[in-house]
Image (cartoon, helix red, strand yellow):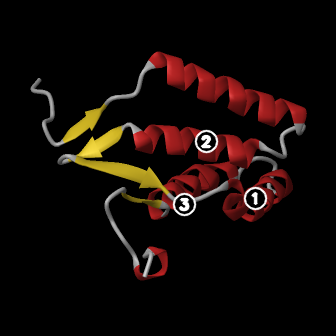
């Protein structure tokens, strides 16, 4: 099977391990409340090392933008005895995609003018 020329990834083990350890420490020391921040760290690492057609990705969200959804998802998962979890994964993926842009994109509210 041929390798894609449009999609490349240049991340390494050292930066991944560092991100994973820091994310784990944040999650454990906050008794799970910091998990949204850990997820955001991971997605920032992944997007920082991903290129599509020569354009690097950028993950734009932080833990505060996920915490409300995270609490809602946990409550609904508990109330439905775990059934809602099947909706959490697609919702989380949708949230990640909606907060991922190309690094070289400039939006009106982000310009230095």
Residue 52 pos. (x, y %): 24, 47
Residue ID at (75%, 42%): 35
Residue that mark 3 sits on: 95
Q: Is residue 41 left or right of residue 47?
A: right
Residue 81, position as x, y percentages in the image? 81, 49
Q: Is residue 6 above or below residue 62?
A: above
Quadrant (top left/top right/bottom left/bottom right) for the C terminus: bottom left
Q: Nearer the viewer, residue 93 or 33?
A: 33
Residue 48 in which image quadrant: top left
Q: Find disc 2 in the rendering and name its residue.
A: 41
Question: Which residue is identified by label 1?
Answer: 67
| Residue 97 in picture, x, y percent from top left | 45, 58
Element carrying mark 2: helix
Q: Position of residue 100 (x, y in %)?
A: 44, 58
Q: Residues within 10 Å of mark 1 (few under 14, many from 20)?
A: some
Residue 109 located left or right of residue 63: left
| Front disc: 1 or 2 | 2
> Is label 1 in contact with label 2 (beta carbons under 8 Å)?
no
Q: Earlier in the sequence, mark 1 or mark 2?
A: 2
Q: Is residue 9 left or right of residue 94?
A: left
Asked if disc 3 and disc 1 are in contact, CB closer than 8 Å, the reply is: no
Q: Residue at x 68, y 59 (%)?
A: 66
How far apart are labels 1 and 2 at the CA level?
A: 14 Å
Decide which of 91, 102 is in the foreground and name it: 102
Q: CA distance from mark 3 to mark 1?
A: 12 Å
């Amino acid at each position: 099977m041929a390798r894609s020329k449009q999609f490349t990834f240049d991340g390494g083990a050292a930066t991944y391990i560092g991100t994973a350890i820091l994310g784990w420490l944040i999650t454990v020391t906050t008794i799970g409340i910091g998990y949204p921040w850990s997820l955001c760290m991971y997605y920032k690492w992944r997007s920082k090392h991903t290129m599509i057609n020569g354009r690097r990705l950028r993950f734009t969200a932080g833990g505060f933008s996920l915490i409300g959804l995270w609490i809602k998802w946990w409550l609904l998962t508990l109330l439905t005895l775990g059934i809602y979890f099947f909706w959490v994964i697609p919702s989380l993926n949708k949230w990640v995609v909606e907060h991922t842009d190309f690094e070289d994109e400039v939006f009106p509210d982000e310009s230095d003018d």
